[in-house]
Amino acid sequence: MSTQLDVRAEPPARRHTLIFETWNALAVGEAFELVNDHDPKPLYYQFAAEHTDQFEWTPLEEGPEVWRINISKTA
């Protein structure tokens, strides 16, 4: 089951915290769909640095107003 986390209404300073709390709560093999109002490329780099080989990042919609990314825990 994949849940959706829409961070567009959240203050920018809180967004990464919410995203990582959501990811940390996943079991291996689970995923969530991130909905954002800008390209979350810096978030991808943070995942890659802190959770190397533990996630999959699958873009579902890439702007210009909405970005949707499926983020799954693989390890």
Image: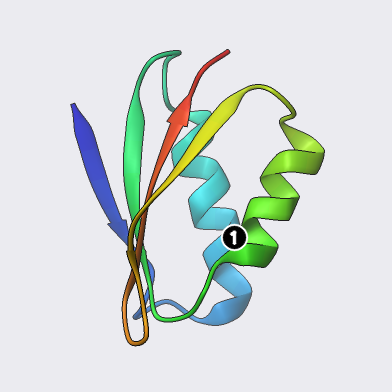
At 33% from the left and 86% from the top, the residue drawn is: 65
At 57% from the left and 45% from the top, the residue drawn is: 20
At 44% from the left and 41% from the top, the residue drawn is: 22
- In the image, 33 versus 19, the foreground residue is 33
- In the image, 10 versus 70, the foreground residue is 70
Rendered-image quadrant of the C terminus? top right
- In the image, 51 versus 64, the foreground residue is 64
Residue corresponding to mark 1 = 16
Q: Identify the image quadrant of residue 37.
A: bottom left
Q: Position of residue 28 (x, y in %)?
A: 45, 13
Q: Amino acid at mark 1?
A: His
| Vertical side of 11 occupied by 36: above or below | above
| Vertical side of 62 occupied by 4: above or below | above
Determine whether, in the image, residue 64 is placed left or right of residue 57.
Answer: left
- In the image, 8 versus 68, the foreground residue is 68
Secondary element at tag 1: helix
